[in-house]
Amino acid sequence: MYAQCAKEGNGGVALVVLNLDSTNQQVLQVPFEGRRYTLSAASLLSKTVALNGVELKTDKDGNAPQIAVARVTPGAVQFAPQTITFIVFPKAKNPSCK
């Protein structure tokens, strides 16, 4: 896990959580509401990647897809095996992130 100040500033914090375990999910207790973006694939050698469960692929004109956000509520957040998750907590009120 890695944390840094969120791009928006105003005390927000962004986390990156890598679950490198191949079989076990991990759980983290979070104190704030946030926005979640999880990258996953069927296997580490897969040619496709999903963002929050939706395959990332361009449209017929080559445009990137819309990014669908998943909401996080305070409490237990689960991280599936072999996933990379970004969570932004804009209301964390971290005094170092002004």
Image (cartoon, rainbow, N blue to C red):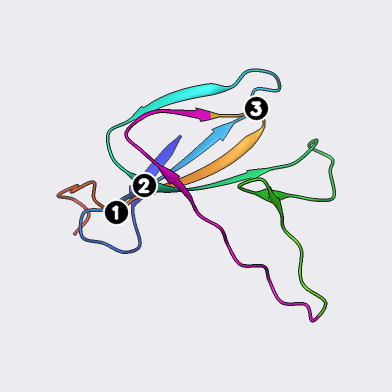
Residue drawn at (79%, 37%) of the image: 42
- Residue 5 percent across, percent down from the top left: 31, 53
Q: Disc 2 vs disc 1: Cβ atoms closer than 8 Å?
A: yes
Give me the C-alpha separation between circle 2 and circle 1: 7 Å
Q: Is residue 74 magenta?
A: yes
Label 3 vs 2, first from the N-terminus: 2
Question: What residue type is disc 1 on?
Answer: Pro
- The residue under label 2 is 34
- The residue under label 1 is 90
* Image position of 91 (left or right of 54): left
Give me the C-alpha separation between circle 3 and circle 2: 21 Å
- Residue 15 percent across, percent down from the top left: 41, 43
Front-lying residue, 13 or 27:
27
Q: Disc 3 vs disc 1: Cβ atoms closer than 8 Å?
A: no
Residue drawn at (85%, 50%) of the image: 47
Question: What residue type is disc 2 on?
Answer: Gly
Q: Is residue 35 magenta?
A: no
* Image position of 93 (left or right of 45): left
Q: Mark 3 against mark 2, which lies toward the viewer?
A: 2
Residue 41, picture quadrant: top right
Quadrant assignment for the C terminus: bottom left
Q: Can you say whether 36 is above or below 57 in the image? A: above
Give me the C-alpha separation between circle 3 and circle 1: 26 Å
- The residue under label 3 is 81
Residue 10, picture quadrant: bottom left
Report the span colored magenta. Answer: 61-78
Front-lying residue, 11 or 65:
65
Label 2 vs 1, first from the N-terminus: 2
Residue drawn at (23%, 46%) of the image: 92
Question: What residue type is disc 3 on?
Answer: Pro
Secondary structure mostly taken by the magenta-highlighted segment of the chain: loop
State the SS at label 2. Answer: strand
